[in-house]
Image: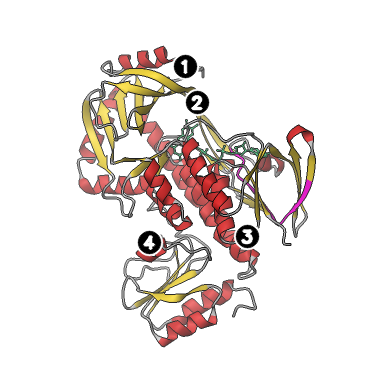
Amino acid sequence: MSKPVLVIGAGPVGLTMAIELARYGVPVRIIDKLPTRTTQSRALAIWPRTLELLQASGCVKAFVANGLHAKALRIHRGNKILARIPFKTISSYFNYLLMLPQSETEKLLEEHLKTLGCTVERETELTDFVDKGDSVSCTLTHKEGKGESLEASWLIGCDGAHSFVRSKLGMVFEGDTLPISFVLADVRVAGLSIPPDEPTIFWHHDGAVMLFPISRDRSRIIADIGSAPLHMPDLEEIQEIINQRGLGGLTLSDPVWLSDFEVNERKVREYRKGRIFLAGDAAHIHSPAGGQGMNMGMQDAFNLAWKLALVEQKKVKPFLLDSYSIERSAVAQKILSDSRRMTKVVLLKNHNLQRLRNFIVKFILSIPMVRHVIANRLSGVMLNYPDSPLNAGSTRKLYGLGSGRRLILKHHFQESNVPQFLLLTRDTPEARTMILRYPLLLKAEVYSPPHKNGIWLVRPDGYIAAIAQSGNWSVIDTFLSSIAANHEC
Ligand SMILES: Cc1cc2nc3c(=O)[nH]c(=O)nc-3n(C[C@H](O)[C@H](O)[C@H](O)COP(=O)(O)OP(=O)(O)OC[C@H]3O[C@@H](n4cnc5c(N)ncnc54)[C@H](O)[C@@H]3O)c2cc1C
């Protein structure tokens, strides 16, 4: 029997990774050192791009049914609205922000994983590993200290911000901790005068308060406390902060989670060393402003799994895997700088600058196109791979769509458990010949193109791999033959 891929950590990223590998038929084991999954609500926001990928994975329905559909993001100064960014213009079938506690997200992912025949092995810790070049020798420690040696084909560290895999590889987690602390409470809120399903940032000259709906009767409050030392808040402290910041009409009660946190902005340079990969918080962490951390991590998993499956199934050459770190590291870099900028704007302390910010935000966000772009940017649908080494064909766009660009068409949502490329072009004998030449890499169907005079080759994760003018089949052929394992072409 072939060696399994070993996934370390059953947080949202490890679970997504195991699901994707399992549904592609790759033998996989997933372990977590903790006895149970988190009961904390932590990450609440699931953005449209993640929902699109969960749809391809076959489990989005349960998410959509269980989460709260937030329709807009609001920015207030006290009770006065400065801006409202609607999500309905997001260029996705999922044109809303799904609010779901991370505990629920993990539960739904774990249930889906079970349907694919894989269960999380809990109270099992990775305590050592050695990359032997053609496999990874892993030492696992089970409950009560019982050891196990395991030969894994690949090791994927989805083991969170304090990653053991990362530190054993000696990878530096470059970045900073911001000199600012936050307190957090998941509570019932009475006296809300804003729609209960619209996340809202309240600005006040003493600091910001953010209110995120969790369910119909429960919200998360986050407030910055400047450079005050980190400490566990109580409900009275948080009530006092919101009273001081002009939100005295709100009454908080029934806290289920009170916490504090500081903002770290860090990432590794490379997501891969030999047969070992990092994904999720193990590879990058940043400010929760924008709610992107978990989404980015889950999208790491979607990016890596199809490539690993094709390599494991010996359908492509192993160099395909090199694109994972390049593509995902560039995305993390972008999100890190976006969220750093957003955090700075939200937490401005100088009163004159705050006044200027409020004025600019009110003016700029009164322009519909600006609101549309911001909503799309937050949603993840604008994250593309323009500099991917996998991009083939013209570096220029063809009818507005270039290589590396996310392309979501209805048929991508049809679940498929075989990682294959889609050919979008007119159904011609040449197109059929191409499919016959690469039966393992190409889906047997020809799909209608965005424009009749072009050919678009779309990756299993919905990004354009290659573009060509109609008839210019050599571009597609050259790309496929460059990645195909030798027996394929
Ligand atoms: C207050 C707060 C709010 C947030 N809000 C958002 C949001 O709205 N949207 C968003 O996208 N993100 C948000 N985040 C970030 C989000 O929670 C993280 O990005 C996410 O949990 C990362 O998932 P992960 O699977 O990479 O790591 P984790 O969730 O940390 O999971 C890692 C797992 O690995 C296990 N593990 C570690 N070492 C080992 C080992 N040696 N052997 C076996 N198992 C091991 C751990 O037990 C753990 O279960 C928020 C975070 C916080 C704290």
Q: Nearer the viewer, mark 2 or mark 4?
A: 4
Q: Amino acid at mark 1?
A: Pro
Mark 1 beta carbon near ligand 1 (under 8 Å) = no
Dividing the image into 4 quarters, which one contains the C terminus? bottom right
Q: Amino acid at mark 3?
A: Val
Secondary element at tag 3: loop
Pinpoint residue 368: horizontal percent, then vertical percent: 21, 46
Residue behind mark 2: 261
Q: Is mark 2 within 8 Å of ligand 1?
A: yes
Label 3 near ligand 1 (CB < 8 Å):
no
Q: Is residue 132 left or right of residue 416?
A: right
Q: What is the number of callouts on the image?
A: 4
Mark 1 Cα within 10 Å, few/some/many (few <14, many 20+)? Answer: some
Secondary element under disc 1, as helix, strand or loop, is loop
For the magenta stretch, what is the residue range?
149-160
Question: Which residue is at a point 74% across and 62% down the rendered structure image?
Answer: 1
Residue 71 belongs to magenta span: no
Front: mark 2 or 1: 1
Write down the residue under mark 3: 26
Q: Earlier in the sequence, mark 2 or mark 3?
A: 3
